[in-house]
Amino acid sequence: MIFDFKDKVCLVTGGIRGIGIEIARSLLEEDARVVICSRKPEGLQKAKETLSNHKNLMTVSTHIGKRKEVAGLFDTIEKVHGRLDILINNVGMNLITPGIADLDPGLWRKIIDTNLSGTFLCSRKAASMMRARKQGKIVSISSIAGTRATLGMGVYGIAKAGIEMMTKVLASELAIFNIQVNAVAPAMVRTQFSEPFWSNEELLAHVIKSIPMGRIAEIEDVVKPVLFLASQGSSFITGQTLVVDGGTTVV
């Protein structure tokens, strides 16, 4: 299947490394106009250098957990491009956390704000822009942690579960405007984000035992499903979470 992203205006949050930068790269290779944002200016500069052979890239320094900064991001997109066709909610962060009973509220807020509130703030602004044109795609990166309680990842899992329900709610609200809203939920992916897990051979072997396909996901395994859900090939699919886990959750 050939994805037709030519001249589509796409925002990839957290597009400076890992899954995000590879989604951005793939969209740019399909002649899309891509905006990436991050709260780290140095990360944006490095990403810009990495993707320097692509002319249709714009970077905007934004903390997506802060409403005013998100408003500024979307104002910039409106001013430069006049529309937004595709939003990829990719920003995510996780810290190993104690059980809920022992959790510091500040740590709760940090993880929830980055993963869940940031997705809400960006989706809210994107939906407003897309409704006016009666078309659009919103794809959020979730995780199988959103449906499986995992020791040390409780708050992260709660945030991802919230993203999956938000996906359903937005899909039901925006379907009348020809806007499709979906999510992709991978298991462990070989990125810098998860390196503390897969770089430990003993721990990696333990993880792989639970994956019928016998390996963890590579970045490309996640990028392609995201591109499908952002393309016209998924025009009658909405409110769904596509699980990319090598069969982990079916056994």
Image (cartoon, grey):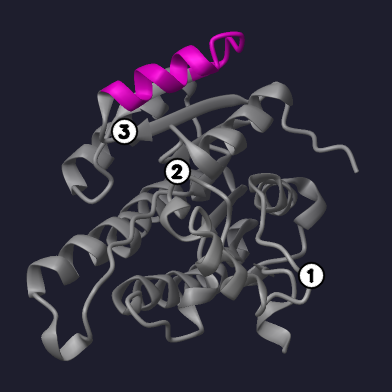
Magenta stretch contains residue 79: no
Question: Residue shown at 43%/86% (left/top)?
Answer: 149
Residue beneath disc 3: 73
Give the residue type that dot 2 points to: Met
> Residue 106 location, x and y as percent?
8, 67
Q: Secondary structure at mark 1?
A: loop
Q: Please name whichever residue, 121 or 59, is drawn nearer the observer in this view of the structure.
A: 59
Q: Quadrant of the C terminus?
A: bottom right
Q: Please name whichever residue, 103 or 122, is drawn nearer the observer in this view of the structure.
A: 103
Q: Quadrant of the N terminus?
A: top right
Q: Earlier in the sequence, mark 2 or mark 3?
A: 3
Question: Residue shown at 71%/63% (left/top)?
Answer: 215
Q: Residues within 10 Å of mark 2 (few under 14, many from 20)?
A: some
Q: Quadrant of residue 30?
A: top right
Give the residue type that dot 1 points to: Met
Q: Quadrant of residue 118?
A: bottom left
> Residue 205 location, x and y as percent?
61, 69
Q: CA distance from mark 2 to mark 3?
A: 13 Å
For the residues labelled 2 and 3, say whether their Cβ atoms are less than 8 Å apart. no
Up/down of 209 relative to 235, above or below: below
Up/down of 200 relative to 63, above or below: below
Up/down of 11 relative to 117, above or below: above
Q: Residues within 10 Å of mark 3 (few under 14, many from 20)?
A: many
Q: Secondary structure at mark 3?
A: helix
Q: Which mark is residue 213?
A: 1
Q: Earlier in the sequence, mark 3 or mark 1?
A: 3
Numbered range of the magenta stretch: 42-57
Give the residue type that dot 3 points to: Leu
Q: Residues within 10 Å of mark 1 (few under 14, many from 20)?
A: few
Q: Which mark is residue 129?
A: 2
